[in-house]
Image (cartoon, rainbow, N blue to C red):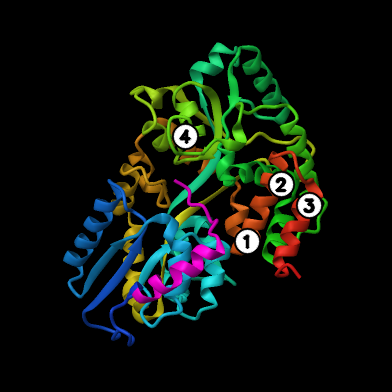
Amino acid sequence: MRPSRRFPLAALVAAAALVLSACGGGGDEGPAAASGPVTLTWWHNGTAEPVRSLWQQVADDYHREHPDVSFTVQPIQNEEFPTKVPLALQSATPPDLYQQWGGGDEASQVESGRVADLTSSVQGWIGGLGSTAQGWQVGGKQYGVPYVQHVVGFWYRKDLFAQAGITAPPTTMADFAAAVGKLKAAGIAPIALGGKDRWPDAFYYDYFAVRECSPQVLKDEIAAVKLQDPCWVKAGQDLQGFLATQPFQTGFNGTPAQQGAGSSAGLVANGKAAMELQGDWDPSTMSSLTDDKDLDAKLGWFPFPSVPGAAGDPAVLLGGGDGFSCTTRAAAACAGFLQYLTSTPVQKKIAEAGSGLPVNADAVASLKSESLKAVAEQTRKASSVQMYFDRAFPTAVGQALNDAVANLFAGQGNPEAVVQAVNQAATGNK
């Protein structure tokens, strides 16, 4: 499940006192010795099985192989991290190891001075993770390490595509529009969208921008948090044109993304819609929302179609990942554990647990379904994976973007307003 980054200010304030009083992380206010026994406090978001037991087992196994390193493992609800981590980094005892999604959030956390610069500790092995690890860099320095990668694309039902006479997944927007038309003609809702949660809306704007903007424009203007190229407005115009084709289920703006059989994931899982633009986690989400034991065999995946003539690279995918950062108290021991998490044996266990696409290519064969293996192969062939914009930007900017895009989906605002919202949020709404 992809976490939301939307946290009302009131909730942050209300949580502050509780968190500051309970965020005892390292359990030792002083720095850890350069050698000798150390206990790492580990905050992760694996509150549900099988991940909860997996992380405990990984900690136990590592301790058995490295007796000087032990763990206090604390599973924490995914939605609590955006509140708890910034506050813990202001306290005397932040966790030694904590869940990290990279991008703008990580950059904001680095400003606390509590996040360890791992560059020299990981330089001997981080290259094996490929370009994925770059999303956990700030200013060229490695402040976190991913353990799984996520990519977004269209999950579709092969049976409904066949029913509508669609013989192959579309590769261009023209092909895609034709497929939507065939599905509607067959009485099938073409695309399910969980607009109530807003972040799924942003996938569409992000992908149109990735197709319209050159890779250099994406790199430069996202880093500068300043959108100037006309491609950003063109992406919004593409989205408006797409919305005009009415491709989504009735009531999509009030539909949740992942909660219940009536969610967008549930609609696809139960054959009520033909496809959904979502991350690699979607089959796992769907399986919990249907009694169909053959669902995996009915699902296929294809990347967001190309926009012919646009400046963007059609081989770029949109995505992100899950990782961890270390704080400064016991950075050396923490970095050693991060290397262990990316080792082939551990990565195979992570793949088997269905947590995401392993960052170690040698573990891909352990993924649970053929469709996920196909996604991993497509990701390997991709020229790059652009991090979701709401994570690539600082938190407030990402929220402003998602809100502005959601307005477009609600029939309000315009493409220029999306760009203006980002640039204004980047200046602190001055």
The earlier-in-sequence mark between 2 and 4 is 2
Rendered location of residue 102, percent (x, y): 51, 62
- Kindly identify the amino acid type of the residue bearing the numbered disc 4: Ala
72 sits left or right of 123 in the view: left
Mark nearer the N terminus (4 vs 3)? 4
Q: Earlier in the sequence, mark 2 or mark 1?
A: 2
Q: Secondary structure at mark 2?
A: helix
Q: Quadrant of the N terminus?
A: top left
Please state the horizontal and vertical placement of residue 309, each as a whole percent of the image.
Answer: 80, 38
Q: Are marks 2 and 4 in contact (CB under 8 Å)?
A: no
The residue pinned by badge 1 equals 393
Which residue carries the number 2 mark?
A: 209
Give the residue type that dot 3 points to: Ala
Question: Label 3 belongs to which residue?
Answer: 417
CB atoms of marks 1 and 4 within 8 Å: no
Residue 173 location, x and y as percent? Answer: 71, 30
* Dot in front, 1 or 4: 1
Looking at the image, is mark 2 or mark 4 nearer the viewer?
2
Residue contact at pointers 3 and 2, CB within 8 angstroms: no
In the rendered structure, find residue 374 and report the number of the disc placed on it: 4
Q: Residue at coordinates 39% horizontally, 37% vertically from top-left?
A: 284
Pick the front one: 381 or 8: 8
